[in-house]
Amino acid sequence: RDDEDTFKILIATDIHLGYLEKDPVRGNDTFVTLNEILEHAQKNEVDFILLGGDLFHDNKPSRKTVHSCLELLRKYCMGDHPVQFEILSDQAVNFHYSKFPWVNYQDENLNISIPVFSIHGNHDDPTGADGLCALDILSCAGLLNHFGRSTSVEKIDISPILLRKGRTKIALYGLGAIPDERLYRMFVNKQVTMLRPKEDEDSWFNLFVIHQNRSKHGATNYIPEQFLDDFINLVVWGHEHECKIAPAQNEQQRFYVSQPGSSVVTSLSPGEAVKKHIGLLHVKGKKMKMQKIALETVRTFHIEDIVLADHPDLFNPDNPNVTQAIQAFCMEKIELMLDNAERERLGNPRQPEKPLIRLRVDYAGGFEPFNVHRFSQKYMHRVANPKDIIHFFRHREQKEKNDIDLNFGKLVSRPAEGMTLRVEDLVRQYFQTAEKKVQLSLLTERGMGEAVQEFVDKEEKDAIEELVKFQLEKTQRFLKERRTDAAEEKIDEEVRKFRESRKKNTEEEDEEVREAMTRARAHRSEDAVLVTASSDEESMDMEMTGSGNPSDGLSATVSRGRVRGRGRARGARGQSSTARGSSRRGRGSTSQESASSSRTYKPVSVPAKNMSIIDAFRSSKPTPSLNSSQSYSEDIIDIDSDPEDASFVPPSSKVNQRLLTPFSKRGSQSQTSRGVDYESDE
């Protein structure tokens, strides 16, 4: 019965506002369905609306989508109808990510008749430097209460919103979408805690809203129901689109799970073909009742599978006309599905006219698919998805395994679920099982694992080197402060004690890793600036030199042989079209011009792009002086020159050394007049 002690809650998930909004046929489906959902909330005079994530389909919804959502929420959720329940918990904790950390209906500047509480899903999750999502826009506008956010990757504490209406009390828990593998690992490591009210904890109806994979997609790519606490009374499970809104009891944990499913078809799969519903939840004391409400504005979707190999009397792969027979059979099936959709629509005038039709054809067994695009032209004005009305696929036959051949030893040795190793885990395990002579004596396994993780996952090539430098500098400062004697045994003992103390203080070690990663990123940024500056100077220098009189140039050095060819010069930016021959860049000038040349540049070290982990440990080599015997040459072949004039000079050292030596003046006068000499490298 509806009385002063009964909560009435409208439950929906995965509305996906803005899905296919540019489609001329299906573009408004999500907005029409949201309008119907809010109509039901207003008609049934619910206490509040509870959404289980994915209100928006895109992380950055369009202006049309946001505008339509604001319009509908303002139309149905604002008014003079009084809110009949109160909040007992600390709202600054429940909504601490919001700029306005209190429930919207208690804001004196707003007139809310139906509060909306929502967690975020994987489609509209917070991103960016400020960690904002589309729900935060609605929250800031005062039309929605966004809760269940968690940014920590180390520990999650879920604090409930405590609601009371008469003698009924609800503890509303929420957890927004988190990558399934990470959340699975945190549950396994007991890093997820659901806080309970201190007073009369057994008198509360515990309602938990979650947005994760419920069905198993991999070893850790889902959240088993057994992970959730057994004091929960009802779990509203979002993210799964198949409608299973009737509460089903978990036999192990004894709580009930309701899976409302999506309110729009976003994938042409069998789970989406189930009739769409929303739920009207009644809660009084510790008892509940879920009332299913069918959505009338959802576009009809029919899907069917056919296996050609199951009809040997109709289809023979060796028959030259078998493709035409398959096409006729598919047309007959689609016509039957269209008839069923039309009969269903006649009883519901609010349903869209064009249905969604999907026929999946298994053509395994030597059959060939026909042209789907040509076939779909027949249904352009009859279905909402003509381009993908037919889907051909081949069912992969799984080889039957003989139980006698199973190696049970291998099965036992497999790691347990949830123990999928990460890079940092591999590093830690390596050092734990390694011999004593290769154990870390100064660095910590945790810090090294994090550095290798940054190196592998984010390609921070300086991560390991910067971590080594940072921990080395910190250890040196520690030894200086302790004024340790120069005896090697005492130094080793102090280093060991210092390392053990750092291993125990995980927060300080995490701060070290973050500082080292910051230095690595800063180092990368400086390298990028230096490389950009060097390329600009190189271009300017080449333009200045190439614009001079070719007859005044110095002779080009030919060091390792000659090649002949015709074409335009590579790399000779700014070179005059009259300049011919080849040239080499060098630091300084020849002996005759050293007095007149005064421009000098510092060598720029360009880091290699592909650095191995071993290279990352090596300290940078000292930069050789300008008098080094190594040199760098750039090859320029003027293809407009005569075959006899074109020369090629192979480089004499690696590019990333950028070290130049003065040229020796060689060659005939004719080569000198044609050559272009670059007096400096950068």
Image (spheres, rainbow, N blue to C red):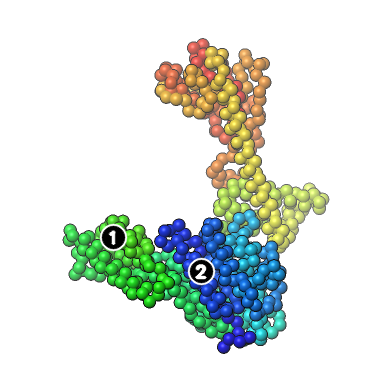
Q: Are marks 2 and 1 in contact (CB under 8 Å)?
A: no
Question: What is the tally of numbered marks visible in this picture?
Answer: 2
User: From this viewpoint, which residue is outermost toward the bottom?
Assistant: 1
Residue 321 position within the rendered picture, expressed as x and y whole percent measured from the top left: 18, 60
Q: Is residue 329 left or right of residue 55?
A: left
Q: Is residue 492 visible?
A: yes
Q: Secondary structure at mark 2?
A: helix
Residue 240 position within the rendered picture, expressed as x and y whole percent measured from the top left: 48, 70
Crowd tier of the residue under label 1, counting other residues whose Cα lies within 10 Å: few below 14, some 14–19, many 20 or above: few
Q: Is residue 619 visible?
A: no
**Quarter of the rendering containing residue 305:** bottom left
The residues tagged by marks 2 and 1 sit, at their Cα atoms, a distance apart of 32 Å
The residue wearing badge 1 is: 378
Residue at point 80%, 49% (across, down) = 480
Residue 205 position within the rendered picture, expressed as x and y whole percent measured from the top left: 61, 82
Residue at point 67%, 21% (across, down) = 598
Residue in the foreground of this view, choosing between 350 and 500: 350
Q: Which mark is residue 34?
A: 2
Q: Is residue 564 above or below residue 34?
A: above
Residue at point 47%, 59% (across, down) = 21
- Which is more N-terminal, label 1 or label 2? 2
Residue in the foreground of this view, choosing between 649 and 345: 345
Q: Amino acid under label 2?
A: Leu
Q: Amino acid under label 1?
A: Lys
Residue at point 33%, 61% (across, down) = 381
- Image quarter (top left, top right, bottom left or bottom right) of the C terminus: top right
Residue 519 position within the rendered picture, expressed as x and y whole percent measured from the top left: 67, 47
**Quarter of the rendering containing residue 183:** bottom right
